[in-house]
Amino acid sequence: MMRTASILSAIVLTAGAAEAATLVNIGSDTVVVQVSEAAGRMDLSLDPGASETVCPDGCFLTLPNGDRVGLAGSETVEIENGSAHVK
């Protein structure tokens, strides 16, 4: 019984981690993206080549160029020159 609970816990934790969005700065300059989730807003700075996992339950991003992007939580977002390419 305990083994079954451990296996189920591992599956749930793995599934939750797979549902977060990944932001990747593919540009040559540091970018600051505003992340708005139910818990509030935060500014996230990404150096060139850096990536960050965010939005496990969905969120909105405000990009350096002013665009807003809604995420469900499973996307990969490449940021270059202030614009986003969602995959």
Image (cartoon, helix red, strand yellow):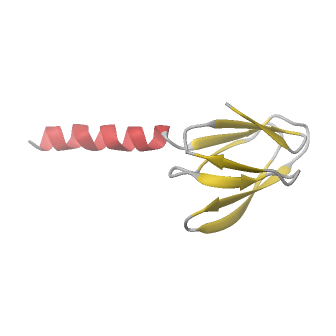
Residue at (67, 66) in percent of width and height: 41
Left or right of residue 18, residue 8 in this image:
left
Q: Please provide percent x and percent y for residue 29.
A: 91, 43
24 versus 61 height, above or below:
above
Where is residue 34, by image quadrant?
bottom right
In the picture, which quadrant includes the C terminus? top right
Residue at (24, 40) in percent of width and height: 8
In the picture, which quadrant includes the N terminus? top left
Left or right of residue 84, residue 51 in this image:
left
In the current view of this chain or complex, which residue is farthest to the left?
1
Where is residue 66, by image quadrant?
bottom right
Residue at (49, 41) in percent of width and height: 19
66 versus 42 height, above or below:
above
Residue at (55, 44) in percent of width and height: 73
Q: Please provide percent x and percent y for residue 12.
A: 33, 42
Left or right of residue 70, residue 3 in this image:
left
Q: Please provide percent x and percent y for residue 81.
A: 90, 40
**Of 50 and 37, which appears nearest the observer?**
37
Left or right of residue 82, residue 85 in this image:
left
Q: Please provide percent x and percent y for residue 43.
A: 74, 62
